[in-house]
Image (cartoon, grey):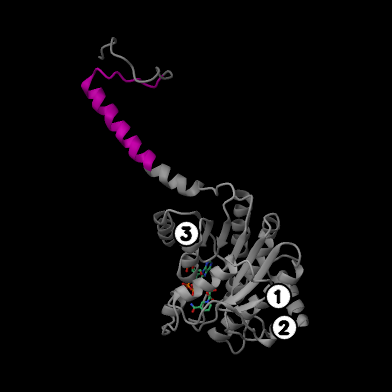
Amino acid sequence: MGDVTQPFIGQPGPAGLPCCKLGNPRTRIMVMRTLALLLVAGFTLGRADAGAQVRPAAGQRVVLVTGATSGLGREVAVRLAASGAHVIIHGRDSARAREVLDAIAQGGKGSARFYAADLANNADIRRFAGEVLRDYSRLDVLVNNAGIGSTPNERSVTPDGVEMRMQVNYLSNVLLTRLLLPRLLASTPARVVNVSSLSAAPVDFTDVMITRGFSGGRAYGQSKLAQVMFTIDLAAELEGKGVTVNALHPATMMPTGMVLRGGYTPRSTIDDGARAVMHLVMDPDVGTGQFFNGMNVGRAHAQAYDPAVRAQLRELSERLVGLR
Ligand SMILES: NC(=O)c1ccc[n+]([C@@H]2O[C@H](COP(=O)([O-])OP(=O)(O)OC[C@H]3O[C@@H](n4cnc5c(N)ncnc54)[C@H](OP(=O)(O)O)[C@@H]3O)[C@@H](O)[C@H]2O)c1
């Protein structure tokens, strides 16, 4: 029995919930233990929760980087946060995302929040875009960076039957950008940066899913050229509306996930590519509707400059992702 003259912690609880008297040494130990446990739990939950609830500050630029869990996207995300931005980190793997969030926290500038989505799946892209629209009242820059390289040299298709590189490297850009466009238009001046490549294979409209003569290089090249066509078209559509759209080849054979997994010998650095992407995100004079090779305006495959091909691709793409 406790000593009723001893003070209670807090207010007496509702019926059925015991209140504790500090006078009893066993009770005191129990209370201290419980408090310690609650403190630890609160700290852990608090940290996780803070990660999940991070919001941009007033006036802070918000930049979404897809594929920010590896290689070029990771480096760009860290640099953007170092510039003071709030970065929406997209990827598939929460452990890799945690590492990027930690690196950003250690840098002590900017802020970041992770969202998972599989770009091979249009329903997942729609869910992801819905979450971004729900959680952010502004979006200053969208960097469509996520991608699959030219290896393995095997054809695979999404659950919707679309050739995998076409979907992840290109069609996901179309769907995500279109879904987020209202937020970009509400945040002008805003930008879209599409991370493409000098690798290019013309789109063959008789076999866009490459059922014949497949190679990983051709699939990669087709998807990367399609990104450039999308860039030119969207830039023209948004001319004068405060949203610029550019594409780039960041650098050749950077030592990123796709290059190292493919067994290629790196020929440039991630710093080279990150500087080129940051240029398109930050520089005031990059214009719109351009294809950059690194830091300079370049020239894409001739097919990119054929308006009839672009119109055909747009019609097909919007049908494939369910926008028409
Ligand atoms: N490396 C080069 O030399 C080079 C040259 C020219 C252009 N690029 C372009 O640069 C961009 C970045 O690639 P990287 O070189 O940095 O390669 P990376 O290290 O392999 O990074 C690719 C990123 O894309 C993500 N991703 C892949 N498939 C995905 C999917 N289905 N859904 C969601 N995310 C997915 C990956 O997420 P996970 O972590 O979950 O796999 C990863 O974050 C690509 O568009 C690439 O084509 C690279």
Q: Is mark 3 on a helix, strand or loop?
A: helix
For residue 90, above or below residue 149? above
Q: Residue furthest left?
A: 25
**Closer to the camera: disc 3 or disc 1?**
3
Q: Does the magenta stretch include residue 84?
A: no
The Cα–Cα distance between marks 3 and 1, rounded to whole angstroms, is 30 Å
Quadrant location of residue 220? bottom right
Q: Mark 3 points at which residue?
A: 82
Nearest to the eye among marks 2 and 3: give it: 3
Mark 2 secondary-structure assignment: helix
Determine whether label 1 and label 2 are within 8 Å by CB.
Answer: yes
The image quadrant where one finds the C terminus is: bottom right
Question: Which corner quadrant holds the N terminus?
Answer: top left
Label the magenta part by its dominant secondary structure. helix
Specify few, some or many for label 2: CA neighbours under 10 Å numbering under 14, 14-19, or 20 or more.
Answer: some
Image point (41%, 79%), residue name: 260
Residue 91 percent coordinates (x, y): 50, 63
Q: Give the range drawn in magenta.
A: 16-43
Q: Can residue 145 be seen?
A: no
- What's under tag 3, amino acid-wise? Ala
Residue 33 among magenta residues:
yes
Residue shown at 23% from the left, 19% from the top: 24
Give the labeled residue for mark 2.
Answer: 305
Q: Which amino acid does label 1 sit on?
A: Ile
Question: Left or right: where does residue 308 sit relative to residue 40?
Answer: right
Q: Is residue 28 visible?
A: yes
Residue at the spot of label 1: 232
